[in-house]
Image (tube, coloured by chain):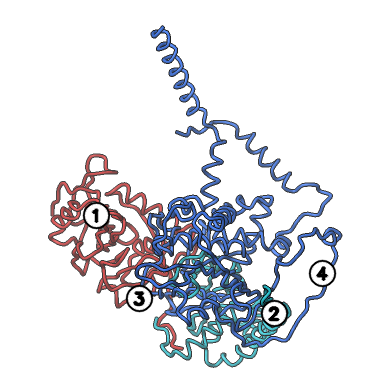
């Protein structure tokens, strides 16, 4: 039972004023603009968009500023804001094969049609603090090299698929309904569509830990990164009144195709299986974790024994959402005076009964 | 490109506040069966569509709510108007509609033609809007049930002769069954599936 | 209203709408002001910000799933001559969406289409193509060739 506490309004108002003051920090230091956050803290913005489940760089930057850099608070703000907007429609499925690629790597093939491009990556940096950034030095000019404007980059998984050594994705049925957990509550067992939606919104830290656990033996799936690609894809939305899909512009996404070993079963020959990750902006760690957990959750499909946390659908999907999680954990700090009084009375009564029983026995 | 046949009448000039006002009116009507409320007074929908019906659809429907229009309304300007302003897809099968609009002045109706919901999701039944000539004259029906203090008396013009039997059958299927909203001009009154028919008189 | 069934024309309009959606505000406002100062477009519904649910495909090419939403701004206008224009742009940009709707309405007028192409669409396409080229050449400079080293004593 929760009982609202009366009063305290002025203290709350004053606490919020103090929060705003502390958010601003030392007035001697110039105030951070949301444009600076959007352009210079891009990966924070990307994470807030992915887990806030709303692609809008300006709003995500504002949320990061308002939340004083607290990612989950920012994600919460974005989730709350989206509920105020009407939904106009659903997009055509994003065609990641048509991506304008900024980064594309594979850990399974070194020679790929289309090649491997590192793009803007932390990989191979030495993780040494760069004090040049502290003094505000300009970065070196970007290098360029000739590029074929029409070059395509086929998926790595399609290359393996040519030999029938990897599972095929279930073909798309345009008439089949697509589950949406923002519309209907999640039920178990959930279809893969709902699992992927849940994981895409899920907390990066939670998914990273689960993914790590699968590598350490808790639901071993023996993964390889088939491919990671980052770049821009076009968004098209079907407009009822026009009768055709209208292009709305481009968004940046990160996609991870994880390739996993599968020994085969009574009915299936040995084959590689797949896990899939997709997220907004540049979110490589998240996309990889998502792909590993997606594959782990498919244990039943491959008659694998389900014994590790990452393979437990109800456990994973019920605890992946950091807004839900923070709401339930953090609500504990709100007044519970009546509950606690009841518990106190209960404990005292049990004590009395225990003492009485002891005295009776003596 | 072919041009639209005629200019499009306006929808809500302020979708947020007018939509909320219409929603509030609908909610009041639904929780107090028999209460006549006003909605859509500022709307001038195309011929055949009453303002309160237009307001209800514009407030509630979007691209995810299939809308069925009766034969009397299908050919006219109501369909393009509602599809344009609400974005609702128009469907030909009443059983696949989330909302339906028909004109009681010209058409009889069978409630069983519409989606009845299912045991897991009784809310997936059709909400049927029936346009009638009057909510103050016509057949009297008396209902009781949740939201009604004692009994509520409604007068509705243009009800089919077997309406009493149809509503009894609809009530018998509870929690399944359709919800009805009767519309006349810019007024509407609701008859949710929870309302029990306790009397009727011509 | 009945939209044209000619698939070529729809495809051409879709391409134009894709460019309008990616245009900066100035890339739309300036040519519209210069060539069609009196277009007289009226709003058929208020310009509004909303959401589109973005879908991905399982494994990149399989069944659809809901990835998350994006903000989108929508405008619908009508010219005095009856052409109805739609503007949809990602983000919350009412001015851009309305200009895109006006441009889409003008594009549908056969009399105006050539000028819309030359004065609005071509400059946008040129800028986008240059930006794409720059991204491609920057990315190409990070192309990497990994070599597999043969390990073990038997390597000949």
Q: Residue at coordinates 40% horizontally, 64% vertically from top-left?
A: A302
Drawn side of residue C12 relative to residue B147, left or right: right
SS category of the residue bearing label 2: loop
Chain ID at mark 2: C
Q: Residue at coordinates 68% horizontally, 74% vertically from top-left?
A: C153
Q: Nearer the viewer, mark 4 or mark 1?
A: 4
Q: Do the residues indicated by labels 3 and 2 lie within the same chain of the protein?
A: no
In this view, the residue in front, A178 or A202, is A202
SS category of the residue bearing label 1: loop
Chain ID at mark 1: B
Residue C3 image offset from top left, x and y in percent = 42, 84
- On screen, residue B5 above or below A315: below
Residue at image mark 4 = A139
Q: Nearer the viewer, mark 2 or mark 4?
A: 2
- On screen, residue C133 above or below B168: below
Chain ID at mark 3: B
Residue at image mark 1 = B176
Q: Are marks 2 and 4 in contact (CB under 8 Å)?
A: no
**Distance from Cα at disc 1 to Cα at disc 3:** 32 Å
SS category of the residue bearing label 4: loop
Q: Is residue A339 visible?
A: yes
Q: Which chain is blue?
A: A
**Distance from Cα at disc 2 to Cα at disc 4:** 25 Å
Residue at image mark 2 = C145
């Amino acid at each position: 039972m929760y009982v609202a506490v009366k009063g305290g309004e002025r203290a709350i108002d004053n606490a919020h004023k103090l929060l705003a003051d502390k958010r601003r920090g030392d007035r001697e230091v110039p105030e951070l603009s949301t444009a600076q956050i959007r352009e210079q803290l891009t990966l924070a913005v990307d994470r807030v968009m992915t887990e806030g489940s709303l692609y809008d760089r300006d709003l995500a930057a504002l949320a990061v500023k308002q939340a004083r850099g607290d990612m989950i608070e920012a994600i919460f703000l974005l989730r709350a804001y989206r509920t105020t907007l009407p939904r106009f429609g659903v997009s055509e499925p994003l065609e990641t094969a048509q991506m304008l690629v900024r980064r594309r790597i594979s850990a399974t093939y070194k020679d790929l049609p289309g090649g491997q491009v590192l793009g803007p990556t932390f990989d191979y940096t030495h993780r040494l603090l760069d004090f040049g950034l502290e003094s505000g030095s300009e970065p070196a000019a970007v290098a360029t090299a000739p590029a074929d404007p029409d070059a395509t980059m086929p998926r790595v998984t399609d290359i393996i698929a040519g030999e029938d050594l990897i599972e095929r994705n279930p073909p798309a049925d345009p008439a089949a309904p697509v589950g949406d957990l923002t519309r209907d509550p999640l039920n178990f067992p959930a279809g893969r569509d709902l699992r992927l939606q849940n994981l895409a919104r899920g907390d990066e830290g939670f998914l990273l830990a689960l993914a790590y656990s699968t590598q350490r033996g808790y639901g071993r799936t023996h993964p390889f990164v088939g491919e990671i690609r980052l770049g821009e894809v076009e968004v098209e939305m079907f407009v009822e009144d026009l009768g055709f899909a209208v292009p709305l512009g481009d968004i940046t996404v990160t996609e991870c195709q994880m390739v996993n070993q599968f020994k085969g079963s009574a009915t299936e020959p040995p084959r590689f299986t797949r896990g899939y990750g997709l997220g907004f902006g540049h979110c490589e760690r998240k996309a990889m974790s998502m792909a590993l957990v997606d594959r782990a959750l498919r244990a039943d499909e491959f008659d694998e024994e389900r014994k590790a946390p990452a393979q437990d659908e109800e456990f994973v999907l019920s605890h992946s959402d950091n807004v839900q999680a923070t709401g339930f954990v953090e609500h504990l700090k709100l007044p519970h005076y009546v509950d606690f009084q009841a518990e106190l009375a209960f404990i005292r009564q049990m004590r009395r009964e225990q003492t009485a029983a002891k005295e009776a026995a003596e | 490109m072919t041009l639209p046949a005629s200019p499009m009448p306006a929808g809500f000039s302020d979708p947020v506040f007018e939509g909320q006002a219409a929603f509030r009116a609908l909610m009041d009507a639904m929780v107090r069966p028999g209460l006549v409320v006003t909605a859509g007074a500022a709307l001038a929908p195309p011929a055949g569509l009453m303002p309160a019906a237009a307001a209800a659809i514009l407030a509630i429907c979007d691209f995810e709510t299939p809308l069925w229009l009766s034969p009397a309304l299908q050919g006219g300007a109501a369909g393009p108007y509602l599809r344009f302003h609400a974005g609702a897809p128009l469907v030909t099968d009443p059983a696949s509609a989330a909302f339906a609009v028909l004109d009681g002045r010209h058409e009889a109706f069978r409630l069983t033609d519409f989606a009845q919901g299912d045991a897991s999701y009784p809310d997936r039944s059709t909400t049927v809007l029936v346009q009638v000539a009057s909510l103050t004259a016509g057949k009297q029906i008396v209902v009781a049930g949740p939201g009604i203090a004692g009994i509520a008396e409604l007068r509705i013009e243009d009800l089919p002769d077997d309406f009493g039997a149809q509503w009894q059958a609809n009530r018998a299927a509870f929690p399944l069954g359709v919800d009805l909203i009767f519309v006349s001009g810019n007024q509407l009154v609701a008859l949710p599936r929870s309302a029990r028919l306790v009397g009727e008189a011509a | 209203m009945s939209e044209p069934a000619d698939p070529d024309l729809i495809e051409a309009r879709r391409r134009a709408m894709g460019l309008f959606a990616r245009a900066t505000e100035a890339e739309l406002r300036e040519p519209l002001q210069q060539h069609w100062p009196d277009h007289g477009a009226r709003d058929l519904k208020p310009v509004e910000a909303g959401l589109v649910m973005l879908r991905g495909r399982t494994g990149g090419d399989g069944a659809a799933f809901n990835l998350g939403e994006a903000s989108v701004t929508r405008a619908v206008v009508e010219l005095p001559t009856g052409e109805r224009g739609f503007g949809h742009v990602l983000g919350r940009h009412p001015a851009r969406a309305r200009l895109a709707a006006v441009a889409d309405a003008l594009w549908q007028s056969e009399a105006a289409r050539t000028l819309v192409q030359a004065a609005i669409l071509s400059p946008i396409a040129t800028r986008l193509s240059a930006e794409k080229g720059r991204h491609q050449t920057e990315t190409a400079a990070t192309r990497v060739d990994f070599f597999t080293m043969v390990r073990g004593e038997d390597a000949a």
